[in-house]
Amino acid sequence: MLLKINHETRYVYDTPVQYGLQQLRLRPKERPGQEIKNWAIEIEGGCLELSFTDQHCNHVDLINIERGRTEIVIRCRGAVENSDGSGIIGSQAGFAPLWYFKRHTDLTKPGPRVRKLVNSLGDDFETDIAKVHALSAAVLENVSYRTGQTNADTDAETALKTGEGVCQDHSHIFCAAARLMGFPARYVSGYLMMSDRIDQDATHGWAEAYVDRLGWVGFDISNGYSPDERYIRIATGLDYREASPISGLRYGAGSEDMIVTLQVQQ
């Protein structure tokens, strides 16, 4: 499936920026089953300082916001051809060893609710892949999809307590629980082409667990199935912070507004 992406993020500041940096992870990963036909990033109101590859093999661009700006626009355009691998990504290909993905972070640290969720699954599974599929279903059963109840700093334990959340929360709970069960796990950010629309609300997030003899396997907990050819993998990390499409800092008083427009179409 050939997918076309138009993605624009616009930051508007109520006072001129004195100093600011934006870290972008917006270039799709080239891998078997995902071929980048073309991809371009345009910056209005800033300039590229440097590019590098991080420990997860994510391509990172560091953008300096021009002094005195009250607006910066980041545009991504490109085409990606995907094939359906039933969610199977395969062997670990990054710089980090598999044990690294068993580490807990502030957003994925397991507490009593995560441990209770893991214990509720029991041990009646013939295979590891059946066990992690059951975990994915259990996360969605315990945390229904609803926007506005959590934010980017909500951790897995808090999201479970709230009982409502979004794809980021589902993925953090899954990673916390999978690691507790002994599986390496990671967060994935990217794009998803929804069948009923061209204009998407935002970028998407899901999780992957490493299963013996299969390698990395994807789980879109929020939608209840494994990623197929409609998904474009952009970045991976131990949690959302390591795979965030855009993150940054700025100095100076005032607030900012962010406006995102995103189209993903075949």
Image: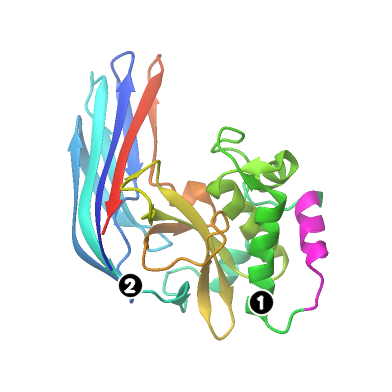
Q: Which mark is residue 31?
A: 2
Q: Earlier in the sequence, mark 2 or mark 1?
A: 2
The residue closer to the viewer here, 76 or 13, is 76
| Residue 172 vertical position relative to residue 218 in the rendered view, above or below | above
Residue ID at (42%, 70%): 94
Residue range highlighted in magenta: 113-124
- Tell me where residue 27 sits by quadrant: bottom left
How packed is label 1: few (under 14 Cα within 10 Å), some, or many (20 or more)? Answer: few
Quick one: 70 or 252, which is closer to the camera? Answer: 70
Residue 75 location (% of width, % of height) = 23, 41
Q: Measuring from the top left, give residue 266's x and y in whole percent.
A: 26, 59
Give the residue type at disc 2. Arg
> Is residue 135 placed above or below 158 in the rendered structure?
below
Residue at 40 percent across and 47 percent down: it is 203
Residue 44 location, quadrant: top left
Q: Element under label 2? A: loop
Horizontal side of 110 relative to 259 (left or right) equals right
User: Residue at 72% across / 68% down in the picture?
Assistant: 181
Q: Which residue is mark 1?
A: 130
> In what element is the residue under mark 1?
helix
Quarter of image, res 67: top left
Seen from the viewer's position, the closer of residues 47 and 256 is 256
Where is 208 relative to 110, above or below? below
Q: Is residue 3 left or right of residue 214?
A: left
The answer to if 117 sits in the magenta stretch is yes
Find out whether the residues at labels 2 and 1 contact each other: C-beta distance under 8 Å: no
The residue type indicated by label 1 comes to: Ala
